[in-house]
Image (cartoon, rainbow, N blue to C red):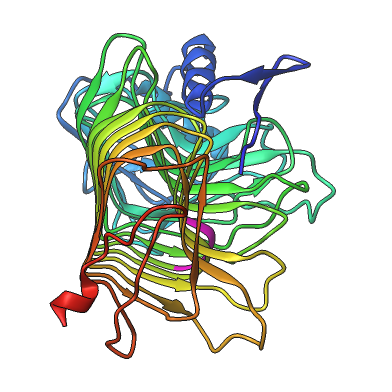
């Protein structure tokens, strides 16, 4: 599936080449905002506390935290805190105009809540289009953890805005134990972005991690427009590396509004591990950027229309191992476990995965294990595959360097994957 990506610039909508444009948008617009002075001077101390307790003396300490009852108070406090500090946001719900209109996280800042659904940052009503609940200036060693980000979309298809969750740009950044809810895609940008790490314009992005987070409650979008729940978004000039581990996606396998659980572009040395998806159009997805040395291991992609979908760009040395892919039923689209199309790919390993239907399908339901083209170097081994799933090959693919061995159906019988016009290379029969 190919999707043109757009971003809103002023009043003109222009196509862009990379999903990372949302990062550039937030970076540029955040840099244009001017912080508002606090009523009391904020010193460059190492730790600050924020609360909704109106009895506080408003000093920014644990005993007398900054009082942030309104969005103006919260955005003003966040805008004026110094780089390289720790910000504790105590229990409560805090309205904000988000990034870029309200505030942006600075380099070295650590924003720590009191727990998911205990500390809630919520976009204020009438927040502008293309707003993130939390966004950053370009920086390093930033961290957001232990809180919920609420996009608070209320338009019910009548409000032409797009809301995002958490977007940090730079290097050595972390997002941990964060829940993102109530985003929407009715305005600018290519899609709503749940939790994203990307590079700045200064250099490559390394040492990043997204861990133990949740994205759920997407509020919909225009036809053909949806959400990427999690993503490592590099650029051709500045690729990204990092770990996306032990996260959850609770969405729907929507045919008309693409729901992407895990997105990637221009990733070098990426690990997607131990994640759990319950409902998505695509489990692992990429339609932009050259990626190299990416491992997608021990994930569960449940109730998905496509488990893995790659298109439109080159990939080198990618491994899909130990994943469970449970294809959605009762959808108008065919279910596909591995869909690799309209791209050039070298060295793809599909090892030890389990592929089945999520629920018993209606009679005549169609599904594919492999639907691939233009791969040089394909290893398919030790997989367990629903026996009714077929395989489709295009463009005289993988004429060389193709190995398929020891694959079986769910009943333990050999599952053979012959190439059209080629002799069967699969030695599953001998492995019996």
Give how far across and how far down residue 396 sits, in percent.
Answer: 48, 41
Residue visible at 33% across and 22% down in the picture = 199
* In this picture, residue 228 sits left or right of residue 403: right
Look at the magenta stretch and give its main secondary structure: strand
Residue visible at 57% across and 48% down in the picture = 227
* In this picture, residue 432 sits left or right of residue 303: left
Is residue 82 in view? Answer: no
Along the line of sight, the residue nearer the viewer: 261 or 48: 261
Q: Is residue 287 magenta?
A: no
Residue visible at 15% across and 29% down in the picture = 46
> Which of the image's four quarters has the N terminus?
top right
419 up-or-down from 237: above or below: below
Residue visible at 20% across and 20% down in the picture = 44
Along the line of sight, the residue nearer the viewer: 47 or 108: 108
Q: Is residue 279 magenta?
A: yes
Give how far across and how far down residue 300 sits, in percent.
Answer: 34, 68
Is residue 19 in view? Answer: yes
Give how far across and how far down residue 315 sits, in percent.
Answer: 34, 33
* In this picture, residue 170 sits left or right of residue 85: right
Give how far across and how far down residue 341 sits, in percent.
Answer: 51, 42
Q: Which residues are magenta?
A: 278-283
């Amino acid at each position: 599936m190919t999707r043109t990506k757009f971003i809103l610039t002023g009043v003109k909508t222009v196509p862009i080449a990379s999903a990372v444009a949302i990062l550039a948008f937030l970076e540029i617009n955040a840099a244009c905002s001017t912080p508002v002075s606090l009523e009391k001077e904020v010193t460059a101390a190492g730790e600050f506390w924020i609360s909704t307790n109106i009895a506080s003396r408003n000093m920014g300490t644990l005993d007398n935290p900054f009082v942030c009852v309104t969005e103006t108070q919260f955005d003003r406090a966040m805008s004026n805190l110094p780089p390289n500090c720790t910000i504790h946001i105590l229990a409560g719900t805090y309205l904000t105009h988000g990034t870029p209109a309200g505030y942006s996280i600075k380099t070295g800042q650590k924003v720590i809540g009191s727990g998911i659904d205990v500390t809630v940052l919520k976009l204020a009503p009438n927040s502008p289009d293309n707003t993130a609940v939390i966004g950053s200036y370009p920086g390093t060693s930033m961290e957001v953890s232990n809180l919920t980000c609420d996009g608070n979309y209320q338009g019910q298809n009548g409000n032409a805005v797009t809301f995002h969750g958490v977007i940090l740009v730079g290097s050595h950044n972390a997002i941990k134990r964060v829940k993102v809810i109530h985003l929407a895609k009715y305005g600018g940008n290519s899609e709503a972005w749940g939790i994203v790490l990307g590079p700045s314009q200064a250099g490559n992005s390394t040492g990043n991690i997204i861990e133990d987070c949740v994205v759920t409650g997407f509020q919909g979008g225009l036809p053909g427009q949806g959400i990427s729940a999690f993503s490592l978004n590099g650029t051709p000039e500045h690729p990204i590396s990092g770990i996306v581990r032990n996260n959850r996606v609770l969405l729907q396998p929507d045919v008309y509004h693409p729901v992407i659980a895990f997105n990637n572009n221009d990733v070098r040395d990426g690990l997607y591990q131990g994640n759990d998806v319950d409902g998505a159009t695509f489990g692992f997805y990429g339609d932009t950027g050259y990626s190299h040395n990416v491992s997608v291991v021990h994930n569960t992609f449940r109730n998905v229309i496509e488990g893995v979908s790659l298109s439109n760009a080159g990939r080198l040395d990618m491994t899909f191992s130990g994943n469970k892919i449970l294809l959605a039923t009762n959808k108008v689209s065919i279910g596909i476990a591995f869909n690799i199309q309209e791209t050039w790919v070298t060295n793809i390993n599909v090892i030890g995965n389990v592929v089945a239907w999520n629920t018993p399908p209606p009679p005549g339901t169609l599904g594919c294990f492999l639907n691939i083209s233009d791969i040089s170097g394909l290893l398919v081994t030790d997989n367990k595959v629903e026996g009714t799933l077929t395989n489709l090959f295009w463009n005289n693919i993988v004429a060389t360097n193709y190995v398929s061995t020891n694959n079986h159906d769910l009943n333990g019988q050999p599952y053979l994957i012959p190439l059209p016009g080629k002799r069967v290379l699969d030695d599953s029969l001998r492995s019996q």
